[in-house]
Image: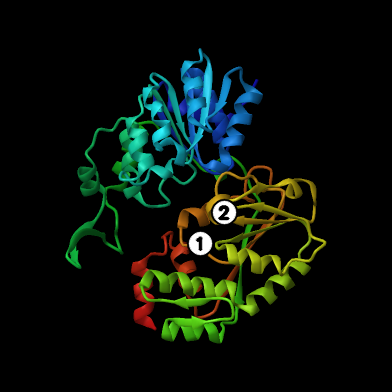
Amino acid sequence: MIKLHPHQERAIKQAGNRERVAYYLDMGLGKTFVSSEQAKMFNNDILVICQNSKVDDWVEHFEKFYDYEVFKLKNEKLVSQFLEYGQPKVAVINYEKTYRPKYKDLLKFENFTLIVDESSVLGNSKTNISKLVQKLKFKNLILLSGTPTSGKYEKLWVQLNLLGWNIKENVFYNQFLNRSLERRFGRVFYKLDKKEPYKNVERLKRKMREYGCVFMKTEEVFDLPEQNFIDVKIKNTKEYKHFEKHSVLELKDVEYIGDTQLKQRLHLRQIATIHNKYKQEKLKDLINSTEGRLIIFYNFKDELKSIKNCIPKDRALSYVNGDVVDKVNYECCNNSITLMQYQAGAKGHNMQKANNLIFYSPTEKCEDYMQAIKRIHRIGQERPCFYYRFKVENSIEEDIYEALERGEDYTNELFNTRISRT
């Protein structure tokens, strides 16, 4: 039996008797427990849609605390078994599988409670996951996110539509976004005003609460330790400067050609982090001077190789990436180092046994950056948290961090601004 914390009980009370609700609770406030207790109150079968790295956690949660028959939907045969099984039952599936043709029988499921974990994944109405969720025949809905929009209100329409606000997408944008039509390369598109992208924000927040959005920040509930951000300046290299000037770089094992802006942007990031010996030296020094568990966030597979070359053999390693989630050494070894790829590790992992985190390279996505910060700054953390942001001087990394600190993704538009400066 689950005993909820007072703030979790308060969140459920705020939701009232609505059949559809969104719990936008800060990372670490226990959205899993709030949502499962809310679903229990709805008294229906349950379908949980979540990121792949969280499937086992959800399965374990329901098996440990409830009497549901729990199905981990790994293939279409299990979908059939789940649909044919009596009540009560729970199924857990990752985002990517839901819209694959062999899982189409999920569309036959009716009158159930749908839980969408990290509902910010529904930010674009045109994506496969958004289209699929809008077709599901659920009775009750629970949306969960610590960062529902990452500061971007244009990402809210699908979620609010699912909650029952029947406002057309274009009308929603016209009411709350300051945008203008532009034509470029024969295409017409909308562009947000940079200085004041949004309008009628207070009205939007009222409507969100009206349609079942419950907000709660960590600082409203707990006094967490101080966060300390330390910028580690890294000397730039002649290789980076050469590629920035000529858009071509030949190294021993690889050749970089920036024949499009997208490739140029990608390769500048790779060269700044994979082929910078000064960054590797700084990492070695920091590892040797830091005791206790250490978390390192990175982007690229070749970057992971560079990081591993800097780690002493006597430090136990754990990994969270697209290929493996192995946190055994993190859990067991006081001096372990956990290497986390942003896309796989920024969300859903409780890493508060550590209080030191290194951003070896920055992510371009603001949401992943905000979520990564919260991996160690959450309930159970009793020590001050230290974040070391490695920044190659006069490089794209400085521009990316500037965007992240403004609460923005780093986009091609911002990259164009950088090119014009250089």
| Res 60 quadrant in image | top right
On the image, the x and y values in percent for residue 228 come to 63, 61
Q: Is residue 411 above or below residue 71?
A: below
What residue is drawn where x is 47% and y is 63%? 405
Is residue 388 in view from this perspective? Answer: no
Residue corresponding to mark 2:
372
Pair 1/2: label in front: 1
Query: Upstream in the sequence, badge 1 or badge 2?
Result: 1
Structural crowding at the residue carrying mark 1, measured as other residues with C-alpha within 10 Å and reported as few (<14), some (14–19) or many (≥20):
many
What's the residue type where badge 1 is placed? Answer: Thr
What is the spatial separation of the Cα atoms under label 1 and label 2, in whole angstroms? 10 Å
The answer to which of 299 and 334 lies nearer the viewer is 299
The answer to which of 15 and 37 lies nearer the viewer is 37
In what element is the residue under mark 1? loop
On the image, the x and y values in percent for residue 161 come to 30, 35
Structural crowding at the residue carrying mark 2, measured as other residues with C-alpha within 10 Å and reported as few (<14), some (14–19) or many (≥20):
many
What residue is drawn where x is 27% and y is 61%? 193
What's the residue type where badge 2 is placed? Answer: Ala
Is residue 327 in view from this perspective? Answer: yes
Residue corresponding to mark 1:
363
In what element is the residue under mark 2? helix
What residue is drawn where x is 52% and y is 57%? 369
Q: In this view, does 24 lie above or below 73?
A: below
Q: In this view, does 262 lie above or below 112?
A: below
On the image, the x and y values in percent for residue 146 come to 49, 43
Q: Single out the residue that lies furthest toward the top.
A: 86
